[in-house]
Image: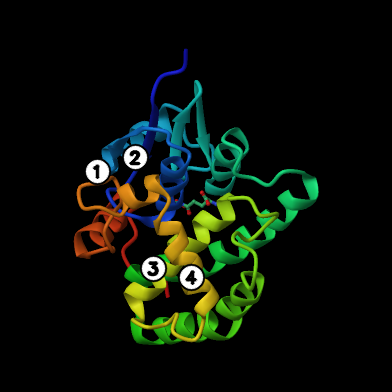
Amino acid sequence: MAGKVVLHYFNGRGKMESIRWLLTVAKVEFDEVYLTTREQYEKLLSDGDLMFQQVPLVEIDGMKLIQTKAILNYIAEKYDLHGKDLKDRVMVNMYSEGVIDLMEMIMILPFTADKPAQLKTIQSKAKERYLPLFEKALSGPIYLVGGKLSCADVQLFECTLMLEELFAGVLADFSNVKAFQGRMTMIPAIARFLQPGSQRKPQPDEIYAKTVMEVFNFNKPLK
Ligand code: GSN
């Protein structure tokens, strides 16, 4: 019997937060080991746990998995959150990849030298490229693909919350996306995760950014 799922990452959102969200929706409990020191990272490296010397690392079903998208896909497949057939699955993956592209722009904010410029890019990409597409996809259907909840919905939902944190009212012109967000918050596991005290992480702060920089020996902003 495989033990409890264990996440190895920083005590912050980053690339692990979508995994936390998906496990939550799949109703899978997880423990977390927070990476706070360079020594912990070096230990994971010397133990051979990080194939590409990167986290996230997730212990699940007796395996130690790396690569965020591979991990998300494994969880989605296992818990029936990956479309009903091959054709739905490729659509789920297309939507997912798009949302991840946008979320990655947000994720690098704490490490970006010119934050105002990055915020401007995120806002225009969100309003001109991503939200119009999802507004159309959700004009009628309850979920993005095949009338069935999938990892793409969970990621889009997470992304809409991130966007609203940065740009209040950003969904004002996207009523279908806003309605979708409202429906998603009614899913009991999601409602619980949104409550204070859950394993959901807050917006990145200075401590999070400093820890990441120290653990990886990065000494200047990304760009
Ligand atoms: O998606 C993935 O899991 C990989 N394709 C990328 C993982 C990654 O970039 N991990 C970072 C920390 S999380 N933030 O971006 C990482 O471990 N960087 C250390 C390094 O030396 O690359």
Find residue 179 and name its label. 4
Q: Is residue 81 left or right of residue 50?
A: right
Q: Is residue 170 left or right of residue 204?
A: right
Q: Residue at x 35, y 55 (%)?
A: 13
Q: Position of residue 85 (x, y in %)?
A: 76, 44
What percent of the width, then of the height, locates residue 133? Answer: 64, 76
User: Amino acid under label 2?
Assistant: Tyr
Eyeballing the image, is 105 above or below 21? below
> Alpha-carbon distance for marks 2 and 1?
7 Å
Whether the residue carrying mark 3 lies under 8 Å from ligand 1 is answered with no
Name which quarter of the figure residue 153 lies in. bottom right
Residue assigned mark 2: 41
Q: Amino acid at mark 4?
A: Ala
Secondary element type, mark 2: helix
Q: Give the residue type that dot 3 points to.
A: Met
Q: Dot 4 lies on which element?
A: helix
Q: Quadrant of the C terminus?
A: bottom left
